[in-house]
């Protein structure tokens, strides 16, 4: 009898990865990691508390334990692990909301219809649901809350760590363009006691930002501005920040956003762009995977450093430096070309 070759086994593992994602969605949605902070519990007691079927929950936790998320410490009794701890609500390292995002049915369906986007070059999201991702969120406050909280999970840790690569101690006022509910601004205001910073985003998103700034104890140095970056960007900041914005849009739209930003920038203002910077060749990079989200949900794409530099130039900006700080996320600093 022949045994399965290593590539065959590895391909099986890759094909089954979406099942892990969906099991993580269930664990995050039910808040299982939070229920294990006091120590291991039987699946029956967990299932009773969250009112689900004990057998179904057991099979999900058993599957996840095989990947190091939760641990079956004795028959049908599960404890937490460092991986499971990232699914706890609220902590600094929490990815619970990011996990919940993968359970939104319309988003899930669009990513599942990747082939449509490859065939047509158009977002499968609009093809399936008849409206853009942002228009959909505007009609679904429940999903918008999950999305904004998911971005908060990334902003507090990953995006804030990326901005850490840049010393903001010489910056008096910062404007976070597309700053969501203000999680990144809150993190920066806490880190830099001299800084004043504004969150700029769509009205229905940014109206939640005061709560985040107040919760972080920095509302006195914060500002909240609603608007549309395709129309204009507020002037008067020393540093303009865009975290995970440009990747949502096509080249012409990016040039529009950057042109509006350039018009707002003073002679000495700087633009800090946090985005994936896709490396050339076969190097594994999370941005190359996240690019498939852009392909299915948005008109945008993840870009190489050269692609960013070319778009900056089209908007009258000059890429001054690039800092690739995390495996998946980099920082580009641009200034006015003239
Ligand atoms: C991927 S999220 C990034 C959020 C945040 N910057 C972060 O890094 O977590 C993109 C943001 O762009 C905002 N946005 C989309 N269209 C916009 C527009 N026309 N004007 C202003 N903000 C917009 C969305 O509301 C959302 O908060």
Image: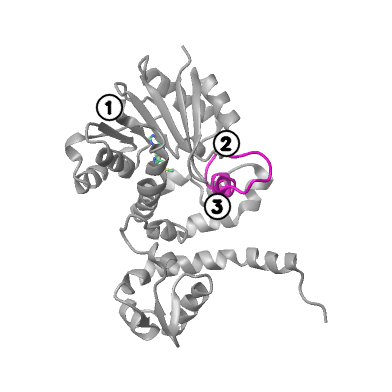
Residue 4: image quadrant is bottom right
Whichever of callouts 1 and 2 sits on the residue coming sooner in the sequence is 1
Is residue 294 toward the left or the right of residue 144 in the image?
Answer: right
Residue underneath mark 2: 303
Q: Secondary structure at mark 3?
A: helix
Q: CA distance from mark 1 to mark 2?
A: 28 Å
Question: What are the residue bounds of the magenta stretch?
Answer: 278-299
Residue underneath mark 3: 128
User: Could you say which disc has been placed on residue 173 in the image?
Assistant: 1
Which of these two is toward me, 266 or 329?
A: 329
Q: Most extreme residue toward the left, as rendered?
A: 220
Residue 27: x and y in percent read 42, 69
Is residue 123 toward the left or the right of residue 274 in the image?
Answer: right
Q: Identify whether 242 is placed above or below 232.
A: below
* Residue 307 visible at all: yes
Residue at the location (29% across, 40% down)? 206
């Amino acid at each position: 009898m022949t045994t399965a070759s290593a590539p065959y086994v590895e391909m099986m593992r890759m094909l089954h990865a979406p099942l892990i994602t969906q099991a993580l969605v269930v664990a995050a949605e039910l808040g299982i990691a939070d229920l294990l902070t006091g120590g291991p519990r039987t699946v029956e007691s967990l299932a009773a508390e969250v009112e689900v079927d004990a057998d179904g929950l057991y099979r999900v936790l058993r599957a996840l334990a095989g990947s190091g998320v939760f641990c079956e410490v004795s028959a049908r009794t599960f404890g937490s692990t460092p991986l499971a701890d990232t699914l706890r609500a609220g902590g600094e390292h929490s990815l619970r909301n990011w996990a919940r995002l993968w359970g939104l049915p319309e988003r899930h369906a669009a990513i599942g219809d990747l082939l449509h986007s490859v065939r047509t070059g158009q977002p499968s999201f609009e093809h399936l649901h008849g409206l853009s991702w942002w228009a959909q969120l505007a009609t679904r406050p429940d999903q918008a809350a999950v999305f904004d909280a998911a971005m908060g999970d990334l902003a507090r840790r990953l995006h804030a760590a990326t901005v850490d690569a840049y010393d903001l101690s010489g910056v008096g006022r910062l404007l976070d363009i597309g700053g969501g509910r203000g999680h990144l601004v809150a993190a920066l205001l806490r880190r830099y006691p001299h800084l004043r910073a504004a969150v700029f985003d769509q009205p229905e998103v940014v109206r939640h930002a005061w709560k985040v700034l107040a919760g972080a104890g920095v509302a006195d140095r914060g500002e909240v501005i609603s608007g549309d970056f395709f129309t204009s960007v507020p002037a008067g900041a020393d540093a303009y920040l865009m975290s995970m914005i440009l990747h949502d849009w096509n080249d012409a739209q990016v040039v529009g956003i950057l042109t509006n930003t350039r018009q707002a920038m003073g002679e000495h203002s700087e633009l800090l762009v946090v985005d994936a910077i896709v490396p050339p060749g076969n190097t594994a990079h999370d941005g190359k995977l996240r690019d498939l989200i852009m392909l299915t949900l948005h008109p945008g794409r993840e870009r190489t450093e050269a692609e960013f530099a070319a778009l900056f130039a089209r908007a009258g900006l000059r890429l001054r430096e690039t800092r690739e700080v995390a495996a998946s996320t980099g920082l580009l600093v641009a200034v006015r070309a003239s």
